[in-house]
Amino acid sequence: MIRKMFMGMDHVGVAVKNLDEAINVYRDLLGFKLLRIYESIENKVKVAVLSTGGETKIELLEPIGSDSPVAKFLEKRGEGIHHIAVKVDNIEETLEEFKGKGVMLVDEKPRIGAEGKKVAFIHPKSVKGVLLELVAE
Ligand code: CO
């Protein structure tokens, strides 16, 4: 019996059409602190990471190219929450457990996310419409 442990929210990912414009809103209008901006070529997104003052961050995601998964999300659903990311103590075991329960996985094996941590996505069809990201603690 695998006993996974959730370790808190890591971040909320927000799909946006234009990162500069979104930073104007989140940092300049609302007052969230901008921690860093980077491009993830592998995931085809430009990312701005903002602090909420606690452990949970906000990630603004602008697609790079029309074949980016975030571009497809924007087409279908418009701007808004794209995924939530939860920390787990053992990502491999969590994926094994979910797989054994028939949960639809986007990633069968963890991959290295842009922040250098192991991550894996769970399909929204198994999570009531929410794309769930697991982040290794
Ligand atoms: Co994420």
Image (cartoon, rainbow, N blue to C red):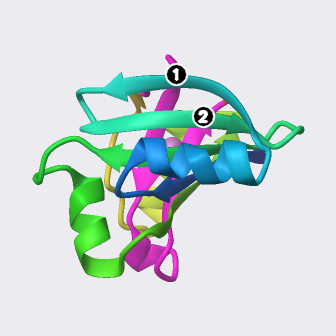
Q: Nearer the viewer, residue 3 or 59?
A: 59
Let me know if residue 20 is in the magenta part: no
Q: Residue 1, how many percent across, how many down?
A: 66, 51
Q: Find disc 2 in the rendering and name its residue.
A: 49
Q: Nearer the viewer, residue 45 or 8?
A: 45
Is residue 69 shown to the viewer in this render?
yes
Q: What label sits on residue 35 in the rendered view?
A: none
Q: Residue at x 14, y 45 (%)?
A: 65
Q: Which residue is drawn at 11% across and 53% down?
A: 66
Would you place residue 126 above or below residue 14 in this image? below
Real-space Cα distance between discs 2 and 1?
Answer: 10 Å
Question: What's drawn in magenta, residue-wise?
Answer: 113-136
Inspect the image, locate mark 1, and give the three-letter code of the amino acid beneath it.
Glu
Q: Find disc 1 in the rendering and name its residue.
A: 115
Q: Nearer the viewer, residue 52 or 113?
A: 52
Relative placement, left or right, of 62 versus 72 is right
Would you place residue 33 above or below residue 39 in this image? below
Helix, strand or loop at mark 2: strand
Inspect the image, locate mark 2, and give the three-letter code of the amino acid beneath it.
Val
Is residue 2 shown to the viewer in this render?
no
Let me know if residue 133 is in the magenta part: yes
Q: Which residue is drawn at 77% across and 43% down?
A: 32
Q: Is mark 1 within 8 Å of ligand 1?
A: no
Residues at marks 2 and 1 touching, judged by CB atoms closer than 8 Å: no
